[in-house]
Image: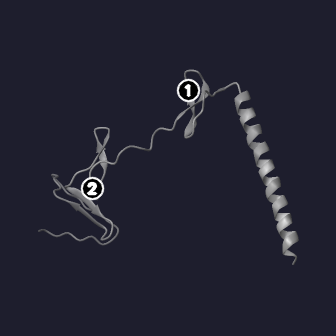
């Protein structure tokens, strides 16, 4: 195997791919801006296309949803607390021991059903 000729061949392939990908990206940007249902204004890094039902157009804007600050402290189970992330020291989960700790369960009738082993104990 002639390594010098192989390296030259690989360089040509990389050059071709770089030139081709630049052309594809330039064509995509041109095509996107030519669409009548797309209104892009001064796009910045991290923005996404969002469909605006009022204008019936795709517009660039910040990505939303799926974020937020976790509620509670480390190991506290997270829950919806009036529309915000909540957590409570009375309900924790230890992933190392696979243990859920709940300080108090109150109900007129407690029904437990499970498919694997479950251990209950009192302190």
Q: Position of residue 32 (x, y in %)?
A: 70, 33
Asked where in the image residue 74 lies, by quadrant, the reply is bottom left
Q: Camera-side residue: 22 or 63? A: 22
| Disc number for residue 61 | none
Residue at the disc numbered 1? 52
The answer to whether residue 28 is left or right of residue 85 is right
| Above or below for 95 versus 108 | below
Circle 2: element type: loop
- Secondary structure found at label 1: strand
Q: Position of residue 62 (x, y in %)?
A: 51, 35
Q: Looking at this view, is 96 or 7 the one in front?
A: 7
Residue denoted by label 2: 76
Residue at the far top: name it.
55
109 lies left or right of 37: left
**Comes first in the chain, label 1 or label 2:** 1
Q: Residue at x 27, y 56 (%)?
A: 76
Q: Looking at the figure, which quarter contains the C terminus?
A: bottom left
């Amino acid at each position: 195997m002639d390594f010098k000729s192989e390296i030259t061949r690989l360089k040509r392939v990389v050059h071709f791919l770089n030139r081709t990908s630049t052309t594809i990206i330039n064509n995509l940007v041109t095509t996107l801006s030519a669409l009548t249902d797309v209104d892009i204004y001064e796009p910045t890094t991290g923005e996404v296309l969002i469909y605006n039902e009022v204008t019936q157009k795709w517009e660039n804007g910040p990505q939303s949803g799926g974020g937020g600050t976790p509620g509670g402290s480390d190991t506290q189970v997270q829950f919806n607390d009036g529309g915000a992330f909540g957590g409570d020291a009375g309900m924790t989960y230890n992933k190392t021991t696979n243990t859920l700790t709940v300080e108090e369960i109150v109900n007129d009738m407690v029904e437990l059903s499970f498919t694997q082993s479950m251990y209950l104990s009192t302190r």
